[in-house]
Every structure is written in C-alpha cells, then in structure tokens.
Amino acid sequence: MQTILEVKNLTKHYKQHTAVNELSFHVNQGDVYGFLGQNGAGKSTTIRMLLSLIQPTSGEIYIFGNDLNTHRNEILQNIGAIIERPDLYKYLSAYDNLSIFAKISNMKADRKKIMEELDRVGLADRYNSKVNTFSQGMKQRLGIAVALIHNPSLIILDEPTNGLDPQGIADMRKLILSLSYEMNKTVMVSSHLLSEIELIANRMIVIDKGKKIVEGSVRELLDPSKTSLQIDTTDNDLAFVTLQNTNWTGSLVRKADRIELQISKSDIPLLVKHLTESNIGIHALQPRHSLEAYFLSLTNPENHVEPVAN
Amino acid sequence: MLRTFFLSCLLLFSKSMLAQDIKGLITKVRQKIEKVNDYEASGKMKTNVAFLKVPLADVNVYFKKPNKLKLKSTKGVSFIPKGAVSFNINNLLSEDFSIIDAGTDKIGNTLVRVAKLLPNDDNSDVVLSTIYIDPVNNLLLKSKTTTKESGTYELLLSYGKYSEYGLPDKVVFSFNTKDYKLPKGITFDFETSSDNKAKTIKSNKGVAELLFSQYKINQGVAESIFK
Amino acid sequence: MWSLLQIELFKISKRPRTYLSFAAITAIVLIFQLAFKADGKSYMDLMLQNVQDNFELNKENAINGYFMCYIILNTLLVQIPILVALIAGDAISGEANMGTLRLMLTKPISRSQIILSKFIASFIYTILLLVWMAVMALFLSILIFGMDDMLIFRVKGEESQILQILKDDVIWRYFAAFGYAAIALTVIAALALLLSVFAENSIGPIITTVCIVIIFTIVSNLNVPVIDKNVKPWLFTSYLVGWKGFFYIGTNTEGQPIPGSIENWPAIRNSLFILIAHIFLLLGITIAVFRKKDILS
C-alpha cells in the first residue's frame, strides 16, 4: 500500500513548551486516518505543520513522496483542508467564496463547475447569499465545497465536527465515509472524541502532550485485551455498593443509567455470578475498549490507566 | 504708486503755491497734461518685493480728470501696490503747501530743478514732498514723498513717445513694505534642509516697475472702472 | 499572480469600508468647497497677513480651482494615510481575524505572492483614492471656482513667501504632485501591511500606523534644531509633504518665477528615493516576516 503522507520526528518548540515532540506516523493511500488526542495534545499544531501554516522546529514531512519544504505548492495543490471552523469571506456570497478559492487553487472553475459543487453540498439555491447570513451547518457545507473544489486527493480535516449539532455531526461522518469509499480520497481527520474516530477511521494515531502514544489499525487497537465494562442492572445503586467491596474490579464509576468499571476478561463470569448471587438482575453488559478507558483517564487523572501498547 | 505720481503732478499745477521762478516751469508742465482729459494705458508691471515671487503682470491704467486713477490687472492674479493708504487726493488738493526752491540736481545726465513742498496743515500725512523737473522738456522726472504713516515713496519717470502729453513710458515706484510672516505650523511646508543658510539681506523696500506700451488718450473712460 | 491580484481587488471592492474612504474624501472636499465658496476671503486675509496694507489683490481671481485643490490637498494628505491604513492594515490581519488567512495559506500559492498581491492591491486602492481626490479636489474645484494663476503661501526657513504660478504652468505640477503623493502614501500602505502581519485583528495595525504617522509628523514639525538635524531626516513623514516641492517654482535673480521650473528638484528627487527605499524595505521585511510566521489564527 502506497504511503501518501509520512512524518518523521516532527517537533515544534514554542518559547516555553514543546507542542509536538518527535512525532512520527504515516498515512496510506485510501486511509481514513484518525488523529486522536485531547485538546492541547498537539493535533492542531501537527496538522498546521502538514499544511505549511506552521514551520516545524525539526523533523521531516513527506506528502505524495515529496518533501513539503521543497515541493510546497505542488503538494498543496492536491490537498483540501478544513482547519477548525470553515471560515470564509463573510461579506462575499457563497458563489464568490467558492470561485475565489477555486482560482487560488489554480482551478479553472467555470460557472457550471461552481454551481455543481454548490449543488452537491445543497447550497445551489443560496449561491448568491452572503456567507454572514448562513447557519453554522451551511457554512460547514460551503467549507467542504471549498476544500473539495479543486479535486484534491488528500483531505485533511481538523476537528470537523466541532460546533456542529448532532445532525451536522452525522452528516459530516457520512461525508467523510463517502469521500473515502465513493471518491477514493485519502482522509486525515483529527478529533478529541474516540467514538468519532472509531466510527469512521480504519487507521489511527493517539497523541498526548505532543508525543505519539499509539498508532495502528483501529480494529486492532480497539480489540480488547483489557476490558472496560458498562453494566446496567435492576438495581444499579446496590450493584455499585456490592462491586465496590470486591478486589477484582477497578475504576468504578456510577453513571446515571449505568455503572462503568475495569475488569480483566477472565473475571467477567465472576462478575455475573457475584451480581446474580446478590439478587441483582443484569439488563445489559457491554464491553468498552481499553483505549477509550485510557482516553477517559486523560480527562480524569484519578482514573489513570496505562495506555495500551501497540 | 501711480496715484502718487499724479498727485505730485497735480500739486505742481496749483499755481498759487509755487514760487515765482519755478512757477513758470510748473505751468508748462501742467499745460502739457491739461491736454489729457482721460486716458487708458496698457503695460506691464514688474514687482520686486522680497517675499513676493510674482511674474510680470499685464496691467491697465485708467485716468479721468480731475483726479480719478485706477490701476487694474488685465488677466490673472496680481498684487497691485497701493499708493499710500493715507493719501487722499481730494484732501491733498485742498491742502496748502509752502514751496521751497531747492536749486538744481542731476538725474542721470539731465540737469533738473528741485522743489520741496511742505504742507501747511500739521495734520497732513505728508511730511515733505520733493519734486525734480526737467526744465528743458518740462517733464517731472522724480518725486519723493515722506509720509507719517507709510514712510517714504519714490517715483522715477522716463518718457518716450507720449512726452508731449507729459505721460511717462516707464514709472519706477519704490515704497516701504512691512514684514510678511505666516503663522508657524499653518502651512506644513516641505522643507529642504539643503538650503544654504546664507541669509539673504532682508529688504523692506519694494519696487514696482511699470512699462507702458500704449496710451489711448481722450477716447473716453467709463465711470464704472473707477468703482 | 495576476489572478491573485484580481482576487484581492475583488475582495477590496466588496467591502463597505472601501467606499467609506471615498465617501469621506467626497464629504471633506465638498465641505471645503462650500466653505470657500461662502467665505474664502477670510482665509485669504489670514494668509495675506499685512500684505494687504501695501497691496491690493484680486481675491476672487486668487480663489480659483487650482488654489482650492492645493488647500484641500494640504489638509487631506495629512488624513489620507488613515484611509490607506484602513485597507492595507486590514489586508493580513483582517483575514487572520476572519479565519480565511489559514485557508488561503493552505492553497498552492507562496506567501510572498500573497504579500505582493495584497501590496499591489493596496497600491491600486491608494491610486484610486488619489484619482478620486483629483476628480473632486482638482477638477470639481476648477468647475466651481474656475482656473487662474495660483498663489502658494509658504514658509521657507525664516522667511514667508508668496509664490505665483501662471495658470498655464499649474496642471503638470498637479500631475507630478499626485504621482509623488501616490508614492508617499504607498509607504503608509507598506507600513500598515507590515504591521498587519503581526496582528490578528485589523484595529491594531490601523491604529498603530496612524499613531506612527501622527507622532512622526509631530516630531517632524517640532522645529527644534537638534531634532531637525538629527532625527527629522530619518522620519519618513518628513518626506510625505514633498509633493509641495512641485509648486515651489524656481525664481530668477529678480525674484520672478520661471515658468516650468522647480526651485529644488534634487530635494524632491532625494525624497522620492528615500520614500521608494522605504517601500522596498518595508515590503522586504513584511515578506521575510510573513514567510517565517506561524499561522496560529
């Protein structure tokens, strides 16, 4: 499989801190590559370095086999990107925005092509409206049209679901999948939500504090070796108290409609038996991935979990 | 300045004021100019004043008996020197002068008779007028007038083809000017620091030179021109 | 590059603030013309000071279109830098603020090209402002007040002077002066563009540009010998009024203006060189800084 994007020992120092630290990863052709990390983990800095918005302190970036330093324009010609919000010229119409970005992408975009694109994202009837009259979702769609107008082969999306309502998030997910499966684009998408990445990506990387934690196939990474469970019982309060007194469960969390806990795979029968013996019926028992547990632990250091090894 | 010139002329014609020997001379001068009821003269004016950088101006002079005189530019913008602010022809005519024969002098190569005129009225702005007359051609060649308010004026006159009417071809009028100073910071000027600092000697003398090329004599001048 | 420039001009043309500048010029010029139509003689009296004791001036001829334009330029060219800064100061920072800068910079165009196209667009805008000024302040004034010889009131060193330029000798000086003003204002545009690179909203660079111009102008006009000698030559604002040099007509030994002449062309030429050097320097710094800049907006 051809490597589309390769990053080697990428580092970015700011005065006081290191945003990205010796980061290496690669994206293959056809991947939907998940770029996962908490806010402030260095995702945006990395993506901005990939798009030449930020100058790396050290390290190398190769895209389409070429060094970004020496083949910048050639490379960018083939990349479409949305970085955080899809910001556009608010005082211009949807048509003008698209036309401008087509032109600076060296596209000879005629009226037909632009209207086609607008139609594809459902904005054809609003082509002449100024962007400042658009809803967030419409802006997002126009942003996508802008990112795709020049038919790039690699698409980089930085937190594309930020600020979107559930419908918008679902639409975005659909779009990313169609980009990959229908249009054969390579997509790199960053998020701070594992659930998002899990649903769309085939490969992923997790970074924290600018360092790679893990990189690999989503299926493999999320294959449970250590398991985290969600259980819902006839009496969650009682179950919570009961389980607190055992020594084979950990990281017990009482949620409104469930209990979350860490357990080794081999102890699951024991758990079932223990609850049954305590006259607690089990409505649902769902395994959660250790990666997610790790991820949760990042937001809550008290529940610290060691990251899974690749 | 022309006004001053004509005033001086008119002064000469007040026979009663003149001493006997110079009277005949002045009468002859007067007889010449008496022939002129009005005239319109066209010419050029060259102004030489330190702060005024102006080109030659095309001017017309209009005269009508007894004492109306007007200097006008025919085109463009022009600075016309005022005779003297305090000079008032009518007043002067009614004023009494004592005439002193001041002998002879030379202007260029021409021998001239000199007369001094002193106003008898102590309130007159004119303190003293000195006139220089060419006794051969009966022409006024120079006058010098000292005033209380505006210093001293000097007129130098040269004659050509209109000398039979006593009308000059060239008049040089010298007068005092006041300092011109613009309020600082009002103009935002572009200063060129390369200016050589050798200060030009500041002169408060202004000179206006009038060269007349043509007179239209006694062809009538509209009254409205003098307004 | 050409299409990039077209895009920049298109963006400028679509912004309301662009037309605000033209409206401001129109308003100021009209106010001037109205005021002078009503009471231009008072201004003349002020400028003539006590000259009127010795001279009579045909003021209605002196207050003509040429004279008006000079008076208006005298005032407006102090304020026009604000209008130039309004566009040039916004060029990068405005896009950073809107978020379009990062999108633009992920496109296959070099950062130098972006700066150059924005600079040229600001330059063209400046030219258009000046053309509009020429239309309003010169041609409209000529229409209202007519054409005649032009008087220049000027302080030269310790002296004050009144210069008179013949009617037929004026218009080329205005063309030259507008050309000079275009270069002078382009320095402002280059400065605003440079400041624009550092900011993420357009208010900062616009205000800073204007402050620099005001402070430099004040220092330039302090009339303190030490400053005049050591500081003034280094302030670009000292050269902004150089357009006036075209109206300082040369005189002969008798003090009469020589038609078609300029008193001190070398001084104007040097000022032009200095201004052009400023443009290249500022533009060079802008490109250098922008090429290295991390886009975090």
Image (cartoon, coloured by chain):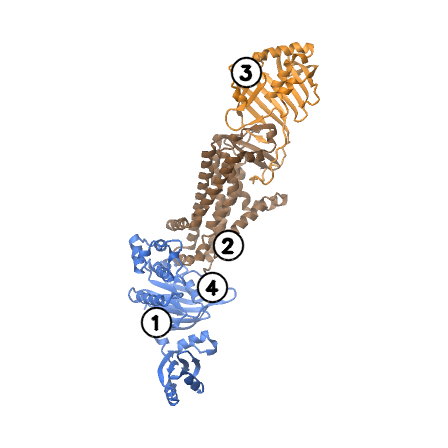
Chain colours: A blue, B orange, C brown
Residue B110 appears anywhere in the view: no
**Distance from the alpha carbon under mark 4 to that under mark 2:** 29 Å
Residue bearing mark 3 = B38
The answer to which of B77 and C296 lies nearer the viewer is B77
At which x and y percent is residue C140?
Answer: 45, 36
Question: Observer-nearest residue: C46 or A41?
Answer: C46
- Disc on the earlier residue, 4 or 1: 4
Instruction: Please identify the quadrant where the C terminus of chain B is shown.
Output: top right
Residue with the mark numbered 2? C204
Labelled disc at residue C76: none
Q: Are marks 2 and 1 in contact (CB under 8 Å)?
A: no
Residue shown at the point (67%, 18%) measured from the top left: B95
| Badge 4 vs badge 2, beta-carbon distance below 8 Å | no
For label 1, the SS is: helix
The residues bearing labels 1 and 3 have C-alpha atoms spaced at a distance of: 111 Å
Relative vertical location of residue C134 with respect to residue A264 in this rendering, above or below: above
Q: SS for tag 4?
A: loop
The CA span between labels 2 and 1 is 44 Å
The quadrant of the picture occupied by the N terminus of chain B is top right
Subunit bearing disc 4 = A
State which chain disc 2 sits on. C
Q: Nearer the viewer, mark 4 or mark 1?
A: 1
Disc 1 marks a residue whose amino acid type is Leu
The three-letter code of the residue at mark 2 reads Gly
Point 61% across, 19% down: residue: B5
Q: Is residue A76 visible?
A: yes
Residue type at mark 3: give it: Asp
